[in-house]
Amino acid sequence: MTAEWCVELKLLSVAFIGLFSSLILGFLSSTSAFPEEDNTKIPFFNPRPTNVSYNTGETAVLSCSVMNVDARYVVWRRTSEPNPISFGEYIYSPDPRFNVTRNPRRHEWNLRIRDVRLRDGGVYECAISSRKKYIRHVLLRVYERPTTAKPTVTMAGSKFVTKGETIRLQCNATGSYHAPEDIDWFKDGNKLIPSVTNNIKINTQLTYEKRILTSVLEVQHTKLDDAGIYVCRSTDLKIANNHVHVLDEGTSRKNVKRVSGTSNGGKNHCCITFSSHFAGILAVSLTLNYLIQQLAKT
């Protein structure tokens, strides 16, 4: 194949990509692409970070949580470029590092950029395919990779609750360069899912400045079988656990601690008993020795 043919093929591929992008943009601009607005189901964005920072080589996650998407589409685009990155879950960028992940439970359409680079920094927009403009901007900052930090997971919260009370556990997770993406909860090896019927609530918050992901688990209206070992696990596969006891009414927490834990009370009692016996024997011995000495004098 000659050099002229290679040049012509490159020009044809560029023209094809440009034409394809134009068709997509034309589709997004046409009224037929947008369903009629229903005043009772107007899409809106849930609060998510609009300013995120990552280091080179990490996987950058730009969050976009949208309610009432219905028949519409979520579109990601970089504001400095005319062509979209994604349309729904389909990726139109030729860069294989881009992909979109859905989290239906949190109504999220998150843009992920693997092996993020300095040139990826900038403003991105998450938009809804609608005749009205529904746009949310996210600023991505990319820095050179710093020294690594060891991921950690810690848990604090209830250890003893009375039946009917609420078990409340808090899990804090940090990552090597940034906070983990999510935290999962388990009880006795079974994954816990938020449920109104099971009285389970999970609230997760991210502190970007400190790079800490905090997840709070609440088990309300506890029953005796809610007792067990609770575990939180980060996406870095670091875990922490807490053994929770659910006490029936009238049960003393001190008695449970004495039975469940290791106690030195018995050992101390034995030592005191032995000491008192030894003192008694010593007193008797001294008394006999004194009497023998007196008899010897006489």
Image (cartoon, rainbow, N blue to C red):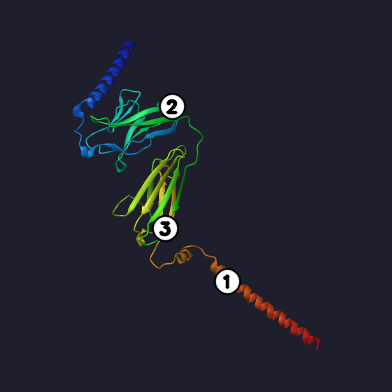
For the point 31% across and 16% down, which residue is it? 10
Q: For the C terminus, which image quadrant?
A: bottom right
Residue named by callout 2: 118
Is disc 2 in contact with disc 1, using a CB cutoff of under 8 Å? no
Tell me which amino acid carries mark 1. Cys
What is the spatial separation of the Cα atoms under label 2 and label 1, in whole angstroms? Answer: 70 Å
Tell me which amino acid carries mark 2. Leu
Whole-percent x, y for residue 28 in the image = 24, 27
Nearer mark to the viewer, of 2 and 1: 2
Tag 1 secondary structure: helix
Residue named by callout 1: 270
Q: Is residue 87 above or below residue 222?
A: above
What is the spatial separation of the Cα atoms under label 1 and label 3, in whole angstroms? Answer: 32 Å
Tag 3 secondary structure: strand
Q: For the N terminus, which image quadrant?
A: top left
For the point 54% across and 68% down, which residue is it? 265
Residue 244 badge: 3
Label 2 vs 3, first from the N-terminus: 2
Is residue 3 in sight in this rendering?
yes
Q: Which of the 4 image quadrants contains residue 204?
A: top left
User: On the picture, is 142 further left or further right than 280?
Assistant: left
